[in-house]
Image (cartoon, helix red, strand yellow):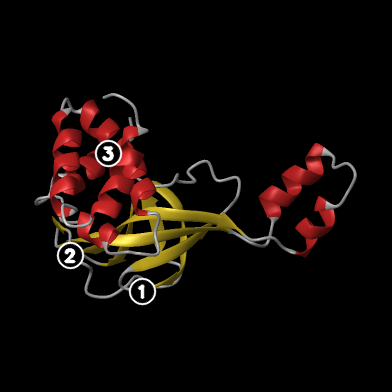
């Protein structure tokens, strides 16, 4: 059970609607696709977001090593632990916590470079996903450049697990119903989302 805030990395760049953080390759807290994260912006203000992309750029040394006939394990480990290029984690902003109150509004201004990014605890996931009426879905659904169906499925799978921990299996069904309602006039997106959710398997 995830009960302690876990530091993931530090911000590289940001805007009101999203931000990018960098972390080490070997960091055990590296989040997965769909993870809910948060970043303190200032006293009494935090931004919340969902991880929608994780990528790793190459560098000159990696290009050279990739063409080697054989690589000793220690060379690979050294490159991963001491590489110059960080893993980049892209996040879409989906809400905020201001003066202790959670909402699905955007923060008044974005976080800044080198602010610390944290993975949300199970309790924070439950608190965020039960605030209001799942209003944060609107941020995801309007982001045309994102893999919306896959992102929602990954997030809902993790949120479902967090709610099961607290004995609330109904949350997932309610979230699915809300998505169907929101997408009733957008059949292609609705089918994409439902197809992705169907791959999660039975509850």
Local crowd size for mark 3, using a 10 Å CA cut-off: few (<14), some (14–19), many (≥20): many
Q: CA distance from mark 2 to mark 1?
A: 14 Å
Q: Which residue is mark 1?
A: 15
Relative height, residue 9 to residue 166 (above, below):
below
Residue 136 in the image: x percent, y percent?
Answer: 20, 56
Residue at 24%, 44% in the rendered image: 124
Q: CA distance from mark 2 to mark 3?
A: 19 Å
Local crowd size for mark 2, using a 10 Å CA cut-off: few (<14), some (14–19), many (≥20): some
Report the side of 4 relative to 82 (left or right).
left
Extreme residue in the right direction: 69
Relative height, residue 3 to residue 45 (above, below):
above
Under tag 1, what secondary structure? Answer: loop
Residue 56 in the image: x percent, y percent?
Answer: 60, 56
The quarter of the picture where residue 84 lies is bottom right
Upstream in sequence: badge 2 or badge 1: 1
Residue 129 in the image: x percent, y percent?
Answer: 19, 46
In this rendered view, identify the residue nearer to me: 3 or 144.
144
Under tag 2, what secondary structure? Answer: loop
Upstream in sequence: badge 3 or badge 1: 1
Circle number at residue 63: none
Residue at 40%, 64% in the rendered image: 145
In this rendered view, identify the residue nearer to me: 12 or 93.
93
Whether the residues at callouts 2 and 3 have beta carbons within 8 Å, the answer is no
Q: Which residue is mark 2?
A: 105
Under tag 3, what secondary structure? Answer: helix
In this rendered view, identify the residue nearer to me: 187 or 107.
187
Residue 153 in the image: x percent, y percent?
Answer: 33, 42
Relative height, residue 34 to residue 202 (above, below):
below
Q: CA distance from mark 3 to mark 1?
A: 25 Å
Q: Which residue is mark 3?
A: 159
Upstream in sequence: badge 2 or badge 3: 2
């Amino acid at each position: 059970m995830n009960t302690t805030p876990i530091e993931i990395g530090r911000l590289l760049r940001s805007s009101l609607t999203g931000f990018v953080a960098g972390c080490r390759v070997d960091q055990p807290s590296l989040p997965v696709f769909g993870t809910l994260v948060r970043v303190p912006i200032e006293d009494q203000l935090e931004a919340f977001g969902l991880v929608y992309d994780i990528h790793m750029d190459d560098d000159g040394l990696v290009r050279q090593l990739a063409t080697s006939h054989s690589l000793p394990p220690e060379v690979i480990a050294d490159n991963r632990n001491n590489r110059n290029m960080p893993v980049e984690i892209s996040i879409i902003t989906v809400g905020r916590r201001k003066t202790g109150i959670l909402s699905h509004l955007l923060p008044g201004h974005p976080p800044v470079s080198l602010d610390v990014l944290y993975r949300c605890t199970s309790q924070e996931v439950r608190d965020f996903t039960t605030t209001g009426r799942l209003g944060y879905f609107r941020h995801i659904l309007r982001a045309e450049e994102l893999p919306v169906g896959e992102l929602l499925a990954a997030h809902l799978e993790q949120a479902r697990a967090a709610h099961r921990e607290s004995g609330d299996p109904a949350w997932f069904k309610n979230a699915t119903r809300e998505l169907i309602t929101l997408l009733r006039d957008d059949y292609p997106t609705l089918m994409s989302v439902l197809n992705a959710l169907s791959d999660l398997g039975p509850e």
